[in-house]
Amino acid sequence: MRIQVIARNMGLVLLVNALFMVIAVIVSALYGFDTGFSPLLLSAIITATIGSFPYIFVKKTGDVATREGYVIVVLSWGISCLFGMLPYLLWGGEFSLINAWYESVSGYTTTGGTILTYVEAVPHSLLFWRASTHWIGGMGVVLFMLLILPEVSSIRLRLSKIEISALSQESYRFRAKETVRVIAYVYFGLTLLEIIALSLAGMSLFDAVCHSFATIATGGFSTRTASIAYYDSVLIETILLVFMCLSTLHFGMIFLLVAKGSVILFKSPVIRYYIVSSLIVGVLVSVNLWFTGTFDSLGESFRHGIFQTFSLVSTTGFATTDSSVWPYFSILLLLFLTLQGGCSGSTTGGIKSDRILIAFYSIKSHITKRLHPKSVVPTRVGGQALDPDMVSGVNLFIILYLLCLFVVALLLSLTGLDIMDAVSASFAHIGNIGPGFGNVGSMSNYSAFNGFSKFILSLVMIMGRIELFGFFILFSPRK
């Protein structure tokens, strides 16, 4: 393992973060040099200075080994979160050391859980920085770095493959350089379109930018304590719903649809499964809300039921109402969707619809094999036979994911949390969702959790963001 290779790339990661801090400083100036100006300026200077040294003085390298690539990706998230908490820590308020760390990790991993009890007390510039951490983390810290990396293609190839995997993208069929650009085109394009749409719908430009950053990254940080319920606008909710859905689809397929008119997006069995399953759950939840009298009318039941369903399945976590007080039937359905998440190739968290579908067909083929022992029954999805190693990897990932859920819930229960809060927080953080149910519902926060719980949840958020295996690979023995 070559320390100089890792150090040079960490330097560039810090410079990327410093750039966004400078933009937040400009936002502070636009709002009359609010109280976030000095913390952000000092943070930008510290981050840029420390990042400049290894990038300038460490010699360029011609290649990156696989293990070095994984170390670079994991450390990129860790070091971004570490320096990203500086503006919070220097500003003060509710941001103690552990709270600043938690908020930073939650932002970069696009989880969206918060320790803030009153969001409006935070200055505009710091809210912009908070939303920016979503936007940086949504595309991936390393992918932002690769957009400007003037290194040889072998480094770009190695890092993009690892980071794309960490971002849950498994089926891009572009060259490494093209892949990064495809993700960037779709990511930037969707963000710009949503900013325009929300502004036209009545949001202020500042709120539109921050909520667009959070939506496309499937993050969930809002500039309002009441989240989307603050606006009480069906039009705004509809726009957010559309972009939450788009952000959970495969970016490569969206690019092919827009750029080349390809209809592969509509033919994908994974996307069909994701949309149909989400709609079915949304309808069931809405009808359940109506029958139980949670809302007075069928229209209101569908308005909140459909929005909350897609907010959670997309792992965004915006809220139009407090879903933690909904009937248990609805909560259990929504818990399943938070486990599932959106599609691979997007910014969403969770296990991913792709893996759920592969696991289902794997079970189906295994049952057929048991009935006909001498037959050869490959696992097929959409008529395509899947490689057995890939199927095994998917099944192992799901087992590991569920095991981590149990272990995290067990650790949280040691702090005195009840079973609903412990399990719900475990689901919400491994899946990078943010809000859960019970006392950590969509209108609540994690300020009451103790330092140990926040540290565990911070670690879990990073693990979930780099898809578990990327984290555990670092601790695997060398051969």
Image (cartoon, rainbow, N blue to C red):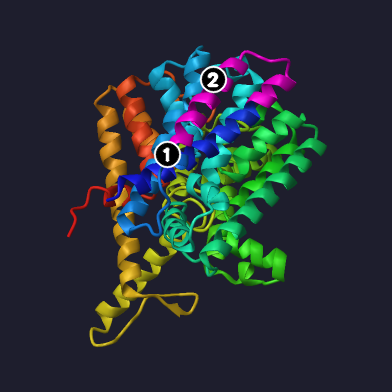
Mark 2 neighbour density, 10 Å: few (under 14) some (14–19) many (20 or more): some
Residue 286 percent across, percent down from the top left: 60, 43
Mark-to-mark CA distance, 2 and 1: 20 Å
Indicate which disc residue 430 carries.
Answer: none
* SS for dot 2: helix
Residue at image position (32%, 42%) is 405
* SS for dot 1: helix
Residue 426 percent across, percent down from the top left: 36, 37
Residue 93 percent across, percent down from the top left: 51, 11
Q: Amino acid at mark 2?
A: Leu
**On the rendered structure, is 356 left or right of 91?**
left
**Residue occupied by mark 2:** 42
Q: Is residue 228 above or below residue 402?
A: above
Q: Amino acid at mark 1?
A: Pro
In the rendered image, the residue lying farthest to the right is: 200
Mark 1 neighbour density, 10 Å: few (under 14) some (14–19) many (20 or more): some
Residue at image position (48%, 35%) is 52
Residue 235 percent across, percent down from the top left: 76, 39
Viewer-proximal residue, 219 or 65? Answer: 65
| Residue 36, quarter of picture | top right
Viewer-proximal residue, 348 or 428? Answer: 348
